[in-house]
Image (cartoon, helix red, strand yellow):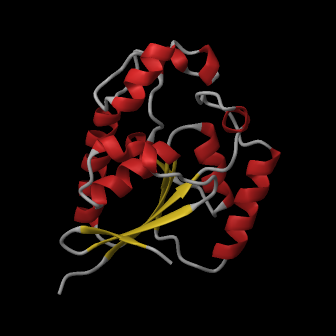
Amino acid sequence: MSEVVRLTLVSHGMTEAMAAGRFPADEPLNALGARQVAELAATQAGTDPGMLCCAPELRAGQTAQALGGPATIEPALADLDCGRWRGMALPDVDPAGLASWLTDPTATPHGGESIAALFDRVRYWLDGVSARGGRHTAVTHPAVIRAAVLTALSAAPTSFWRIDIAPAGRTTLHYRGAWTLRLR
């Protein structure tokens, strides 16, 4: 029997953009996010995170640092590129473009990255993690975690918006021939 690969995906803590319902930019954790991450770190004290990596954005790096960083920066864990919508509130976005983006995983009305492209990026990264083996902790963004969960379940990208990932939340995947989602 082969070794089980253990992957814990950690969502960064709350930011002002999340609290205000804006598309993310490269913002830091807000005060609530810092508290969330401190609480998460306290619950994980004394556990081996294995290989710790994080997305390149500031909020992910701050979260990884609180969890015992330093962490290796992993570009594949970067947040979904929202292009021209970066920093904008939902009511300020073209409604037709937003509707297209929310219903068509290949749409890029913002000039950024499609949900389908995010899935491809995350699937490729997961393939690399499974090949390396061992225990991994990856600090990243809700969009990346949604894509990883749906990839593990062989679910369609059209299900992307049906998963809610909490700030400073943990999601665990295991790999032994195929990815599985582990619920606690």
Residue 125 location in percent, x, y? 30, 50
Question: Is 51 drawn above or below residue 18 in the view shown?
Answer: below
**Residue shown at the point (72%, 38%) measured from the top left:** 19
Q: Quadrant of the N terminus?
A: bottom left
Q: Can residue 54 be seen in this view?
A: yes
Q: Which of 65 and 183 is in front in this view?
A: 183
**Residue shown at the point (67%, 50%) measured from the top left:** 13
Left or right: residue 132 compared with residue 39: left
Residue 133 location in percent, x, y? 29, 70
Q: Is residue 74 visible?
A: no
**Residue shown at the point (48%, 37%) measured from the top left:** 79
**Residue shown at the point (66%, 32%) measured from the top left:** 21
Residue 102 location in percent, x, y? 41, 30
Residue lying at the far bottom of the rendered structure: 1
Question: Is 160 drawn above or below residue 103 in the view shown?
Answer: below
Left or right: residue 132 compared with residue 60: left
Q: Which of 17 and 61 is in front in this view?
A: 17
The total number of labels drawn is: 0
Question: Is 69 drawn above or below residue 27 in the view shown?
Answer: below
Residue 24 sits in which quadrant?
A: top right
Residue 135 sits in which quadrant?
A: bottom left
Residue 168 location in percent, x, y? 63, 57
Question: Is 86 drawn above or below residue 55 in the view shown?
Answer: above
Q: Nearer the viewer, residue 64 or 70?
A: 64
